[in-house]
Amino acid sequence: MSENKIPYKIYLSEDEMPKAWYNMRADMKNKPAPLVNPGTGQPMTAAELEGVFCSELVKQELDNDTAYYEIPEEIRSFYKMYRPSPLVRAYCLEEKLGTPAHIYYKFEGNNTSGSHKLNSAIAQAYYAKQQGLKGVTTETGAGQWGTALSMACAYLGLDCKVYMVKCSYEQKPFRREVMRTYGASVTPSPSMDTEVGRKILAEHPGTTGSLGCAISEAVEVAVTHPGYRYVLGSVLNQVLLHQSVIGLESKIAMDKYGIKPDIIIGCAGGGSNLGGLIAPFMGQKLRGEEDYRIIAVEPASCPSFTRGKFAYDFCDTGMICPLAKMYTLGSSFIPSPDHAGGLRFHGMSTILSQLYHDGYMEATSVKQTDVFQAAEAFARVEGILPAPESSHAILVAMQEALKCKETGEEKNILFGLTGTGYFDLVAYENYHNGVMPNNIPTDEDIAASLAKLPKV
């Protein structure tokens, strides 16, 4: 189909929306390594996990074989409030860059949470409600996940307790207030409310926190309060399953116009957005049907893929969660308080870690000031103020488009625009005022953290 027939925004009808989530593990030759009980050294059983997570979510977490999970009608009805999300052809950005590349982005910011996180939040809250629970606990970094979960819990009448990484709690008061508007309690982490929080503060006085710290606190509260379970916004297999709706919609939209992406790019913190975006395309790659170049983009301040180790590690700083085999910087690694709060996790999804280890995708890390330079350039020509996390993908998409300008190749580039940056204006202010640092951990910092990896 000729280029001029491709609209700026490709929308799907409600009837075209995916009716099932896709599980990449079903097509993986090398399955992700199982979660391990740190006490016994044995794979976690469903019974053990059900003390922390909802029963149906445990089933999804452990299922390596079922390719498709039907999306319950109640969740599909909720999705229709903001889905399907648009696939946008970035004509203005292409023109500004002078590239022959065709740039597309899947925009997930068309809901009050401002990000893709709502896709999994409503699913996890739904299963908690179905189980008859009183409420859920969680962590949040930049605040998108906490906001999304508070929205989902308000809709379903569940209590929501959020532990927000301290530096983000302070940098993003408005994000915090949106969560409170939806009825959530929001606590800066690490806090004095929990045993693990007090321990972390004693060992790291004045710390600005990390996702690993917040996870530890949320899990402790969940397991010590009857009627509560813990839910997580990234990393877990179940989350990538729910987020596959992003990639499924993207592929349906591109197939309608005969478009095949050559390069697929996503920001990577724990893996929810990247895993969701690439899911159906990776499935084709795993089955040998198509080939795609897939790039994970992470912050240089927290480079788990590019400088981490593929090993078993705790998912939380307090070392109370199961062990996961993943690319990790070590659970004791506390990254600098950069503004890409949602990407400040020490490890990576076990699914994405295995795929990266097996050579199905590549990874790169980028500096904070370069990310905001790209975000500003994108906002000026595409009219959307992007989230700092999303802007990691924007930067590399622009770099790849400029390479096409040098070679004259008309490649199709797809990237994930995970959400908007309207709650990130302090970060933009720091960038514009020239006071934004580029914090990059030293080899010694990473080595010291990796030296503490558990022996499995």
Image: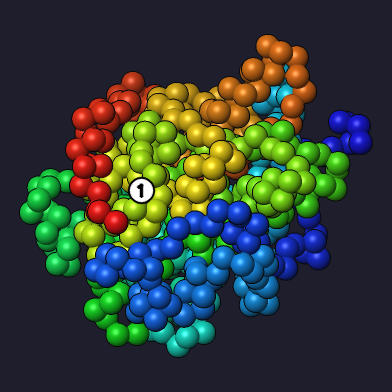
Residue 453 or 112: which is nearer the viewer?
453
Give coordinates of residue 85: x percent, y percent.
Answer: 68, 53
Q: Is residue 243 above or below residue 337?
A: below
In this picture, residue 350 sits left or right of residue 180: right
| Whether residue 408 can be seen here | yes
Residue at x-position 56% and y-position 32%? 394
Q: Give the farthest residue toward the right.
A: 1
Residue indicated by mark 1: 311
Q: Is residue 424 above or below residue 157?
A: above
Q: Quadrant of residue 241?
A: bottom right
| Whether residue 21 can be seen here | no
Q: Quadrant of residue 194?
A: bottom left
Residue at x-position 41% and y-position 84%? 133
In this picture, residue 198 sits left or right of residue 303: left
Give coordinates of residue 393: x percent, y percent.
Answer: 54, 35
Give coordinates of residue 310: x percent, y percent.
Answer: 39, 44
Question: Which three-letter amino acid code belongs to the residue tagged 1?
Answer: Ala
* Label 1 element class: strand
Q: Quadrant of the C terminus?
A: bottom left
Q: Quadrant of the N terminus?
A: top right
Give coordinates of residue 300: x percent, y percent.
Answer: 38, 31
Number of numbered labels in the structure image: 1
Q: Residues within 10 Å of mark 1 (few under 14, many from 20)?
A: many
Q: Give the farthest residue toward the bottom.
A: 132
In this picture, residue 225 sits left or right of residue 352: left
> What is the image's colouring?
rainbow
Residue 266 or 39: which is nearer the viewer?
39
Residue at x-position 72% and y-position 68%? 19
Residue at x-position 37% and y-position 33%? 307
